Amino acid sequence: MKWLESNLVVIFWAVIFGEVIGYIVGALKQVTYDPMTIGITMAVVSVVAVNGIMLLGRSDIKSSEGK
């Protein structure tokens, strides 16, 4: 359950920060701002990054305990 809750928090904050940064960058570069695309992209990238870091850290802990 902790894994699910942590991923939901990561998705929530990634979408919020992605929308804010996307809006600012869109205004500065004068390009079309598409909130749905930015939100989905940030959610996927953040979940992959956080879970990848967690898996890499877990394998490092297991390998150091075996020595």
Image (cartoon, rainbow, N blue to C red):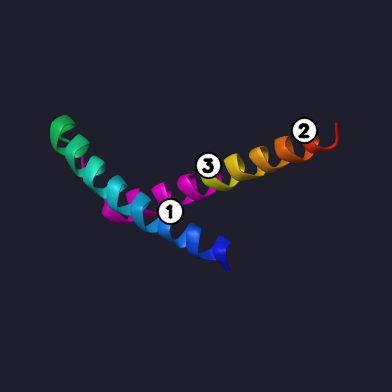
> How far apart are labels 3 and 2 at the CA level?
23 Å
Quadrant position of residue 27: top left
Label 2 belongs to which residue?
Answer: 64
Front disc: 1 or 2 = 2
Disc 1 marks a residue whose amino acid type is: Val
Nearer to me, 10 or 62: 62
Disc 2 marks a residue whose amino acid type is: Ser
Q: Is residue 33 visible?
A: no
Q: Are marks 3 and 2 in contact (CB under 8 Å)?
A: no
Residue 41 placement (x, y as % from top left): 42, 48
**Residue beneath the point at 58% across and 69% down:** 1
Does label 3 or label 2 sit earlier along the sequence? 3
Residue 17 placement (x, y as % from top left): 29, 47
Q: Is residue 55 visible?
A: yes
Label 3 belongs to which residue?
Answer: 49
Does label 1 or label 3 sit earlier along the sequence? 1
Label 1 belongs to which residue?
Answer: 10
Does label 1 or label 2 sit earlier along the sequence? 1
Q: Is residue 20 magenta?
A: no
Q: Residue furthest right?
A: 67
Mark 2 crowdedness (10 Å alpha carbons): few <14, some 14-19, many ≥20? few
Q: Which residues are magenta?
A: 31-49
Query: Secondary structure of the magenta portion, mostly?
Result: helix
Q: Which mark is residue 32?
A: none
Secondary structure under tag 1 reads helix
Disc 3 marks a residue whose amino acid type is: Ala
**Residue beneath the point at 22% across and 46% down:** 20
Q: Is residue 45 magenta?
A: yes
